[in-house]
Amino acid sequence: MTARNSLNLRPVDPASLDAVAALEASASPEAWTRKALSDSLNAGHRGFMLCNDEGQPLAHCMLSVVLDECELLIIAVVPEHRRQGLARTLLTQLIQGEFAQHQWFLEVRASNSAARELYQKLGFESCGLRRAYYPGLNSPQREDAILMRRLPTMHTKGSDPSAYAGV
């Protein structure tokens, strides 16, 4: 298990794209390619990664930020480090930090109960449904996406975003 005090939040930049693309490839059968990650950055999206002391990314996410809205486009954790709170740590640092006063949006597979539970603990609430949005993982049948939103909150630095559901 990785000690939380040895994790560092860093921006994704062109120099880190190979490492982030490798993380993506290990994390999902629907992984973003290096080109997709690069195109996302070039489109003005913001990438963040949670790195260990050696600078190796263990988790990353890409955000689309427009005015006071923040959309989580993708999030991934290295498989051998899952269920250790890395996605929660990454999102919490962003929610409590630079994007604390932003309204957040995301979509998640209806079958991804672990991710939905995490988002709910971070103050996200379901706000819609996209029917047959995702390709099926192990079947030709498509899967619904649950839309989720988190309203900005007033808090002091260091407060736990799971302690409130929004304003």
Image: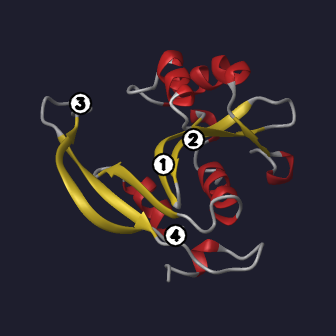
State yes or no: discs 4 and 1 in contact (Cβ < 8 Å): no
Asked whether 20 or 150 is in front, the reply is 150
Q: Secondary structure at mark 4?
A: helix
Q: Which image quarter holds the N terminus?
A: top right
What number is the disc on residue 138? Answer: 3
Disc 2: which residue: 61
Above or below, 4 against 25 in this view is below
Q: Residues within 10 Å of mark 3 (few under 14, many from 20)?
A: few
The disc, 4 or 3, on the residue closer to the chain's N-terminal end is 4
> Position of 167 compared to 84: left or right?
left
Above or below, 146 against 56 in this view is below
Image point (77%, 73%), residue name = 157
State yes or no: discs 4 and 3 in contact (Cβ < 8 Å): no
When asked about the image quadrant of residue 76, the answer is: top right
What number is the disc on residue 72? Answer: 1
Identify which amino acid the numbered label 1 is placed on.
Answer: Leu
Disc 4: which residue: 121
Q: Secondary structure at mark 1?
A: strand
Identify which amino acid the numbered label 4 is placed on.
Answer: Lys
The disc, 1 or 2, on the residue closer to the chain's N-terminal end is 2
> Position of 88 compared to 67: left or right?
right
